[in-house]
Image: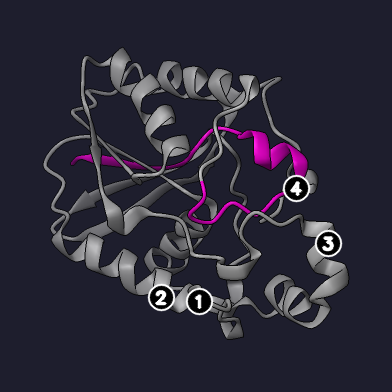
């Protein structure tokens, strides 16, 4: 049965500084590039035939590093784009914790009730993910390169968890969840494959997630 790997992009320059990215662009950091290369190496034993990516540069760059390893071309999929953080985009986590404390508290502890001003909710992201999954019929090993919120929502959906458990999973830059898929049934093999990141794990405590 085909394997599907749902990966988070490599670390970006805004990840380092604790800045909310959303739909804005932020390039991979040197560590992020190394993480993408490590991901490519970790997948070398699989007959990867497709790399499908969010259209944002940080995912395309990550996906391209992997795709080159397999002589593939990255396919861009708008439904895998990051959650729209609206007015939070481009702003720093600590600033928002101080100036928008109630929404920040809800986002960290009750994410299922938050709708970002001029942006999305995780229910919107879930709807996008389900539209993608309904039309995605993997016939060969495939890598999906996307974002923290999309990986989390996909795991909530595929593992039949409530949206209140959005933050439950460990989602690292350059790591991926591994599923095997048959007739639209997604069977989890490993929730967070990260052994290849030895010495390359980004510090999530600095990031605006």
Other residues around mark 4 within 10 Å, as few (<14) / some (14–19) / many (≥20): many
Q: Secondary structure at mark 4?
A: loop
Q: Residue at x 35, y 16 (%)?
A: 44
| Disc number lying in front (3 or 2) | 3
Q: Any mark on residue 121, and which?
A: 1
Q: Any mark on residue 95, and which?
A: 3
| Disc number lying in front (3 or 1) | 3
Outermost residue toward the right?
98
Between 154 and 101, the residue placed more toward the observer is 101
Q: Are marks 1 and 2 in contact (CB under 8 Å)?
A: yes
Vertical placement of 25 versus 63: above or below?
below
Picture colour scheme:
one colour
Q: Any mark on residue 124, and which?
A: 2
Which residues make up the magenta segment?
A: 1-24
Pick whichever of labels 1 and 4 is earlier in the sequence: 4
**Rendering coords of residue 161 (x, y %):** 49, 73
| Quadrant position of residue 202 | top right
Between 89 and 80, the residue placed more toward the observer is 89
**Rendering coords of residue 192 (x, y %):** 54, 43
Other residues around mark 3 within 10 Å, as few (<14) / some (14–19) / many (≥20): few
Q: Secondary structure at mark 1?
A: loop
Q: Residue at x 35, y 46 (%)?
A: 54
Q: Any mark on residue 18, and which?
A: 4
Pick whichever of labels 3 and 1 is earlier in the sequence: 3
Q: Residue at x 37, y 64 (%)?
A: 158
- Work out which quarter of the rendered image holds the N terminus and state it: top left
Q: Any mark on residue 28, and which?
A: none
């Amino acid at each position: 049965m085909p394997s599907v790997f749902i990966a988070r992009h490599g670390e970006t320059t805004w990840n380092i500084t604790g800045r909310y990215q959303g739909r804005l662009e932020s390039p991979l950091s040197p560590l992020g590039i190394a993480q993408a290369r490590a991901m490519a190496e970790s997948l070398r034993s699989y007959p990867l035939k497709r790399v499908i990516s969010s259209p944002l540069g940080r995912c395309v760059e990550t996906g391209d590093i992997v795709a080159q390893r397999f002589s593939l071309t990255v396919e861009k999929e708008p439904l895998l784009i990051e959650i729209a953080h609206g007015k939070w985009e481009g702003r720093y986590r600590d600033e928002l914790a101080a100036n928008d404390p109630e929404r920040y508290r809800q986002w960290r502890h009750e994410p299922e009730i938050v709708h970002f001003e001029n942006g999305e909710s995780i229910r919107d992201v879930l709807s996008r993910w389900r539209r993608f999954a309904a039309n995605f019929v993997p016939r060969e090993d495939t890598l999906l390169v996307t974002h923290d919120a999309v990986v989390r929502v996909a795991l909530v959906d595929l593992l039949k968890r409530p949206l209140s458990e959005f933050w439950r999973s460990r989602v690292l830059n350059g790591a991926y969840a591994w599923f095997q898929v048959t007739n639209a049934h997604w069977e989890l093999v490993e929730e967070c494959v990260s052994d290849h990141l030895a010495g390359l794990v980004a510090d999530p405590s600095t990031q605006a997630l």
